[in-house]
Structures are given as C-alpha cells and as structure tokens.
Image (spheres, rainbow, N blue to C red):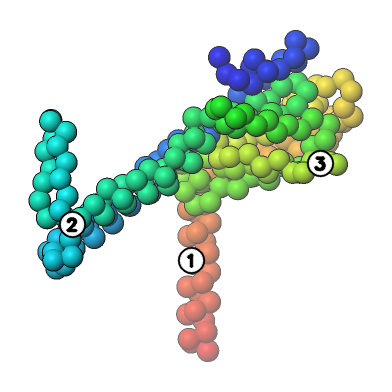
Amino acid sequence: MSYVAKAISDEERLLTLARPHWIYLMTGFVWWMIFILIGLFLDKYFDEYLSRYSLDFFLNLKIIYFSGQVTPISVMFTLIGITAFWPFFMTYISSEIGLTNERIIYKTGLIFVQIDQVDLDDIRAEHIYHGWLGWFLGYGKIRIDCRFIEDLKLPAISKPYRLVKASHNARYRHPEIEYGHDEFSGRLKQIEHHQTQATPAKKIEKLKNQFKISFWKSARDKSA
C-alpha cells in the first residue's frame, strides 16, 4: 500500500496516485554505463601505454578470478557510476504524488520521508514542462503556482495532463471552493488544447512548418 494512501485522513478520498516516470531509472542507468565505459577505457590505456605506472591488482572471489597488471581505475569509475545512478533510482522508487479531494501531496524518501503538500484552494496555475524527450515518451514535470506558500515542483510523471485535469475536477466539485462552471470549462479547454499541441505528431508538424518558413526566408534573402 502506498504511503500517501495511508497518510490521508478519514475525511479525505484519494482520487489519483502517480509515480515518477521510468525515465529516471533509464537516466541513472545510462550515467552508470557511461562511467563504466570511461573507467574501462582509462584502465586499458594505462595498461597498454603506462604499464610501468600500473598497480598489481589481485582479486580472488573463488568463482571469479582477476589477476595481472591492471589498474583499479575501472572499479573506481564503476563506484562513481553507482553514486550517479543512486539519486535517480531513489527518486523513482520512493516518490509518490497523490491527489485527494482536499489537496495534492508529494512524498519523497524511504527512511527519511518528506511531505510537501498544497491545498486545492491555494492552487493558482499549473505549468507543464516536457522537453523534447518528454514529448515523444509522454511524460512531463509539473510546477504548481501556489498562493501564500512556495510553489510545488513535481517530478516527471507519465500523462501529466491527466493529473492536472483531475485537480481541476476536484476543485470544481469541492463545496467550499468558488470555481464557476464557465471558468472550469474554459480551463479544461485550455488544458486540452495544450495537451493536443504537446503530442509528437503536432510537434513534428510544427517543426516541419518552422523548417519551411526558414527555408523560404533563406531562399528569398538569397534572391534579393
């Protein structure tokens, strides 16, 4: 059971629960592999060209046996890669974003848990940031503009517009929040428009149009 589901009060209802996108795990793994490759490259370089400066490295694990004139550089860079991988891994496995009928809750950490939250009535606007990779993989980071308190920044999640829509629906149905039907409908249409514009097909079409405009401007300038 999720931490957020256990942490809410009896008067609250959990509407949506989101977790970080798998891109965090992939990013950490890529950095780990990069450091491993750098270490292996430097290790081979030292062994071939600077062998007189290399160290006698011996390790016997009974199952795996290593010995010879090599340097421990690859081991060191592997450990550095693990250090780079760990924050992404912890973000992926320990973070939760919960939407209730009263608030948005952002939980981080496994042992030392930190909770950031904002009441629905304090939300003034939401901003979604995709990046090129996010547009194609369908994830985005959300920054929530808040009243009286610091803005809430959420990690990259899959289908971020779904969470934003759900928060507006929760605000509209809340009996103590003034949120007129016209304002609610207008905001939903605005969100759906941004969601449509953020699809890969729309982004590719936009890039094609920008390329055509740039091409014709360049051709016109040359002819003039």
Quarter location, residue 97? top right
Badge 2: how crowded within 10 Å, few (<14), some, or many (20+)?
some
Closer to us: 86 or 34: 86
What residue lies at 18% left-to-right and 65% top-to-bottom?
53
Please tell me in which quadrant of the rendered image residue 168 appears.
Answer: top right
Q: State how far apart marks 1 and 3 are (Cα).
A: 43 Å
Disc nearest the viewer among 2 and 3: 2
Which picture quadrant has residue 148?
top right
Q: Residue at x 53, y 77 (%)?
A: 217
Give me the disc on residue 58: none
Kind of residue at disc 2: Leu
Q: Amino acid at mark 1?
A: Phe
User: In the depicted view, which residue is nearer to us: 80 or 87?
Assistant: 80
Residue at label 3? 149
Name the residue carrying label 2: 55
Q: Earlier in the sequence, mark 1 or mark 3?
A: 3
- Element assignment for label 1: helix
Q: Which mark is residue 211?
A: 1
Q: Secondary structure at mark 3?
A: loop
Q: Earlier in the sequence, mark 2 or mark 3?
A: 2
